[in-house]
Image (tube, rainbow, N blue to C red):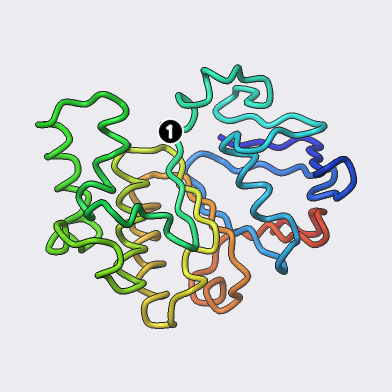
Amino acid sequence: MIQFYHVSKSYDGRQQAVSDISFRVKKGEFVYLTGPSGAGKSTILRLMICAETPDDGQILIAGRNIARLKQHDIPKLRRGIGVVFQDFKLIERKTVYENVALSLRILGYSEEVIRKKTGHVLKSVGVYSRKDSYPLQLSGGEQQRVAIARALVKDPIILVADEPTGNLDWDVTQDIMALIKDIHAQGTTVIVATHNREIIKRMPKRVLHIEAGRMLEQG
């Protein structure tokens, strides 16, 4: 499903973000990407969604080398990948419903389909009752649930989460991770970047450990 072959990426030609990274994530697998802050976790996730381009190596998603994608092909790739960020990235002037429906609107779905799919996903993550609220009216946990709903509404085959519980207390963290576990149980390939060892201890899955831009452990 996802394969990195000897991938390197530097910024400004000097700062090496990742160096000679190789790993494979199978279809339907749940994998943690761990390591200290600045280790290169976010860079790897950004490379997966073509927000960054590797300097060297190959990145294959479903057998396709995305490092060679033309600019106009990138939106098609991203339709199959749901992304959840630590800081939610919700649009403050739009309601919960509007935040989640936006990507479907951009993709050209009819209003009837948008209404059905958005309502369904908001119910599935437990925030349907807040659909007319604005992000700043929500708790941190509610905002993250909306962010997950936004990632899921496109029916992605891959869910990528970058420190999805980094700003949340432990009780809310457990709720969010339980939700991600349920998403994985439905067949979605899941990659979670986290430095929270307690999460991994409570919900063990395969771990890819990175330090200083290098893959030190796969197990």
Q: In which quarter of the image is residue 48?
A: top right
**Left or right: 204 as drawn, with respect to 15:** left
Circle 1 residues within 10 Å: few <14, some 14–19, many ≥20: some
Residue at the image position 22 percent from the left and 46 percent from the top: 98
- Residue lying furthest left in this view? 112
Q: Residue at x 86, y 50 (%)?
A: 15
Drawn side of residue 11 relative to residue 163, left or right: right
Viewer-proximal residue, 121 or 17? 17
Q: Which residue occupies the extreme front position in the image?
A: 93
Quadrant for residue 169, please give it: bottom left
Dot 1 lies on which element? loop
The kind of residue on which mark 1 rests is Gly
Circle 1 residue: 80
Q: In which quarter of the image is the N terminus?
A: top right
Residue 113: % across, % down: 14, 32
Most extreme residue toward the bottom is 170
Residue 66 position, x and y percent, is 62, 26
Residue at image coords 70%, 33%: 53
Give the image location of residue 42, x and y in percent. Answer: 64, 53
**Picture mark count:** 1
Observer-nearest of 102 and 191 = 102
Quarter in which the C terminus is drawn: bottom right
Give the x, y percent position of residue 153.
29, 42
Foreground residue, 175 or 206?
Answer: 175
